[in-house]
Amino acid sequence: MNSSPNSPLNSATSTHSKIHQSALVLEQARVQSTPVPPLTKSIFEGETSMSLLEAYTIQQAGIAQRIKAGDRVVGYKMGLTSKAKMEQMGLHTPIYGVLLQSMQIHPQKGYSLKGKIHPKIEPEIAFITSQELKGDVTPEQALRACQYLVPALEILDSRFKDFKYFSLPDVVADNSSSCDFVIGNPIELKNFNGDLKKIQVEISEDGTKLHEALSSAALGDPIASLVEQVRLLWEYEQKPLPAGSIVLTGALTAAVQLRAGQKITGRYQGLTNIELEIRD
Ligand code: OOG
Ligand code: MG
């Protein structure tokens, strides 16, 4: 079929190729530890803008490449759920990214900065689900589907130069800056006697407390963040959140820059601490 340069068919094809190209550029930046300019200032330049749907499609295309190379989805991460993070990043809408098996690191081995561009770390509350959740769920349904409550640290490493994006779609396309994550000892939610909204969380560097917050910093309640994750996953991918998913509910405090030699500690009231030695 012939089509004129401005036909909807041509513009759909060019959007498709921009999505594909963006996913390749970001994956290459990640693998080669070489940051790139924001997509909205490069591949998508001249377009009115990149939509959030296009951004999530780029994210999915990037994840699909990694799955093809042997990786596996183990969960999801919410981002920009707290005021501290929204202010730090200058963006104000909650977003999500995908957690892959290869991104889970084990604190006993420490954390090597090799191959990282400009890594940061942040403390989060996570859940592990034991039932599928789909679409619009109530906080009660989400809570019933959570088997474990887990302390977590997320390591971010934006593939964009200077850790700067110019729009929400840029960061979403880049798997919402996710790089790696650590989860501490899970406890069965039924054995947790505290209030999920009132878990005191701190992050320190070499024994000095840098930031602290209550778990309610994540959308008022980490369960609300899980509800939002389930809703967004349905909205953008028409996918349920499978049973057995790890869900990071979003940083409770601002993120801390990583450098070799640091000892990072996450403290979570009623849960065990996570300690991470950072090395070259
Ligand atoms: C975006 C990801 C934010 C969180 O927990 O708020 C995030 C970023 O900071 O680059 O993971
Ligand atoms: Mg995070």
Image: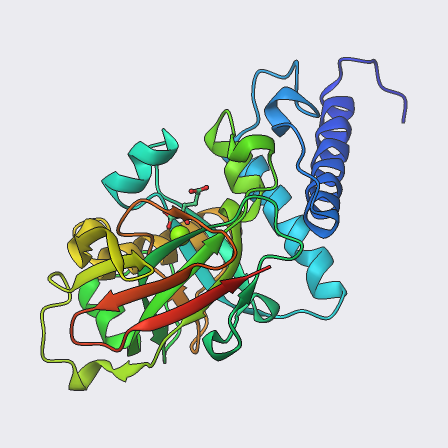
Identify which residue, 266 or 131, lies in the foreground.
Answer: 266
Colour approach in the figure: rainbow
Left or right of 146? Residue 73 is: right
Left or right of 143? Residue 29 is: right
Identity of the residue drawn at 73% across and 70% down: 70
Going by the picture, which residue comes out furthest to the right?
Answer: 2
Residue 132 coordinates in the image, percent (x, y): 40, 73
In the image, residue 12 above or below residue 213: above
Identify which residue, 54 or 104, lies in the foreground.
Answer: 104
Identify which residue, 151 or 231, lies in the foreground.
Answer: 151
Left or right of 154? Residue 37 is: right
- Position of the N terminus, as image quadrant, is top right
Whether residue 138 can be seen here = no
Residue 55 coordinates in the image, percent (x, y): 56, 38
Location of residue 205 (image quadrant): bottom left
Q: Quadrant of ligand 1?
A: top left
Location of residue 182 (image quadrant): bottom left
Location of residue 12 (image quadrant): top right
Residue 59 coordinates in the image, percent (x, y): 60, 47
Identify which residue, 94 or 109, lies in the foreground.
Answer: 109
Identity of the residue drawn at 46% across and 32% down: 168
Identity of the residue drawn at 26% across and 78% down: 272
In the image, residue 9 above or below residue 4: below
- Counting the numbered discs, the total is 0
- Position of the C terminus, as image quadrant, is bottom right
Left or right of 81? Residue 75 is: right
Residue 94 coordinates in the image, percent (x, y): 35, 42
Whether residue 120 can be seen here = yes
In the image, residue 152 above or below residue 177: below
